Amino acid sequence: MAEPRRWYLITYDIRDPKRWRKVYALLKGYGEWLQLSVFRCLLTDRDREQLRWELARRMDPVDTLLVIGLCGGCVERVRAINPGEDWPEEPPPFRVL
Amino acid sequence: MSPRPVVVEPTLRVHALHALAYCERLFYLEEVEEVRVADAAIFAGRRLHARLEQEGERVEVEVSSEVLGLHGKVDAVRERAGTLVVHEHKRGRHASGEGGPEAWPGDRLQVGAYALLVEECFPGTEVECRVRYHQTETTVCFPLDEPLRQDVVAAVARARLLRASGMRPPVTTEERKCARCSLAPVCLPEEERIGSGAERPRLFPEDDVRQVLHVTTAGSRVGRASDELVVTPPEGEGEPVRLPVRTVSALVSHGAVQVSSQVLALCVERDVGVHWFTSGGRYLGGLGGGGGNVQRRLRQFEALRQEAVCLGLARRLVAAKLEGQLRFLLRASRGDVDAREVMGSAVRDLRALLPGCAEAASLDVLRGLEGAGAARYFGVLPYLLGDDVDPRLRFDGRNRRPPRDRFNAVLGFLYGLVHREVEAAIRSVGLDVAFGFFHQPRSSAGPLGLDVMEQFRVPLADMPLVASLNRRAWDAEADFEVTPEHVWLSKAGRAKAIELYERRMRETWKHNVLGYSLSYARLVELEVRLLEKEWTGTPGLFATFRLR
């Protein structure tokens, strides 16, 4: 039994290059960079709260953040509209490189 | 007047009183053993406090007192009409009392302690406590009265007593508290309750959702770019692969792979295990696991220094291993009359060895029994392979260092992976691999790792290997590198073996004693935790799992 995970789309608008770099580096540790200031992350509740806390420490009140949780149906629709993209429900537990 | 000798006992975090009021065992694990696990609620709480700071709501005040034996940070202290008001913010709901909202006992104690500390700084001033519950948006007020003072003093005394004692308090009787406790994966309350005869199955411990990353391509480099691991293959063999560090649970490097020191630092910081194998598949060692855990280690050393404890554990371990071999033989030959006939005598011999384990007089006797069992078991293992298995893949006795046939090459590699898993589990539980109870200390491998591993050889290596050979999953040419002296796995073969093993680790099965399903990956860690419980209060559960 694993902790359940969900896909999140995370976008931000940071008004200062220094803070922006910090936030960008932080998010790189949690998920995949999709487009300018847009990340997707597969997170447990614990990861999500940790990420939000770490972001709160790096961001300023003038910056904005949007965390969008995607339900199973939403993810399927993303797949249907962008068929090239892979949004696995449960990524394999190991990788061999 | 000559100064009195001062016995300085370190002050206690006020926050610890909150844990103490919730569960004495939680207090002990956090404050004495320093095991802390942050769950979603804890991060949400931290974020609440960060937000309050931004809104200009909060003036943190650090207070401490040798007299009271406490130190801590008050969220805010304000003066209102001559009364000092101590504020504390909580993310959750308030407790409901008879006359409306009330503070939870732990919160009362915590704020009461802050109030006492504040009072000590401003003697003679009246002090009032306020707890703000953000989920329900209610504020609960109560004065610092005599009963509350006494509660705090009593709690500090109790905390000091627990801190001084070497024994872990028992699991709380209020089960529902465990469901929301962040330390439940370490404390394993349900397992303890099962051990004491109660039946309350529960899905635990949880699987790690992160990936194990095996880097097998010789010449790869693993580097760090901010919080990503970047695996760059040798020139001309493809693009770098980037992985967010939080999606990785362990980095396993096979053979000639460069891992930068920045990656090592990141992995240590983020609790990612790093392990090294030789290109031939021998486990060299690894990094990882929490620092310290000195209490656990001391208890381990104390327990395993007693010969009776070691003998008792070793008896059960050898019995578990022999029974595992026996059950695998019976299971694999089920319904196969010919195989049963060939195996008849081996099965009988193995059965006859079992009672001897329970009454073996010394470790040497047990080693003899183990050896006799292994001889019988490996003697008949070849008969479990189907008729259509490639003759080059057949098995004729165990050999190693180096393996001289293909079967032994894969088996040795799989054992190496099992060994890694067990050592990683021992480290993460906070025990010392170097001090075991059955194996003799040897140069490279830690005896405790070899001890615990014995139970897992059959289910995690032998069984999947025999099954995969019977499925004809192996290619005798492409998967191996054969020289006259030894046989190694080729790159393709190694990838196959890793896949076989990792898939097996994710298979779930129902534990015969604990009664709930869990994956083999979690079983390994569970066994180590149960082993630790052998000398910390709940003996009798280690080495009790059996194949069906």
Image: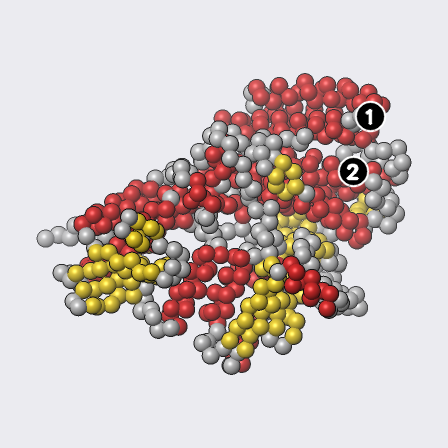
- In this view, the residue farthest toward the left is B1
Q: Amino acid at mark 2?
A: Ala
Let me know if residue B237 appears in the view: yes
The foreground one among B11 and A88 is: A88
Disc 2 is placed on an element classified as helix
Q: Earlier in the sequence, mark 1 or mark 2?
A: 1
| Residue B163 placement (x, y as % from top left) | 34, 44
Give me the residue at 47% from left, 42% from top: B187
Report which quarter residue A5 is drawn in. Answer: bottom right
Give me the residue at 23% from left, 52% from top: B68
Give me the residue at 38% from left, 44% from top: B23
Q: Chain of mark 2?
A: B
Please determine whether, in this image, residue B299 is positioned above or below residue B76: above
Let me know if residue B256 appears in the view: no
Q: How many marks?
A: 2
| Residue B276 placement (x, y as % from top left) | 66, 52
| Residue B518 placement (x, y as % from top left) | 61, 41
Q: Closer to the observer: label 1 or label 2? A: 1
Q: Chain of mark 1?
A: B
* Residue identified by numbered label 1: B336
Q: Amino acid at mark 1?
A: Asp
C-beta proximity under 8 Å, tags 1 and 2:
no
Please determine whether, in this image, residue B183 is positioned above or below residue B541: below
Give the alpha-carbon distance from disc 1 to disc 2, as whole Å: 15 Å
The foreground one among B50 and B261 is: B50
Report which quarter residue B547 is drawn in. Answer: top right
Disc 1 is placed on an element classified as loop
* Residue identified by numbered label 2: B467
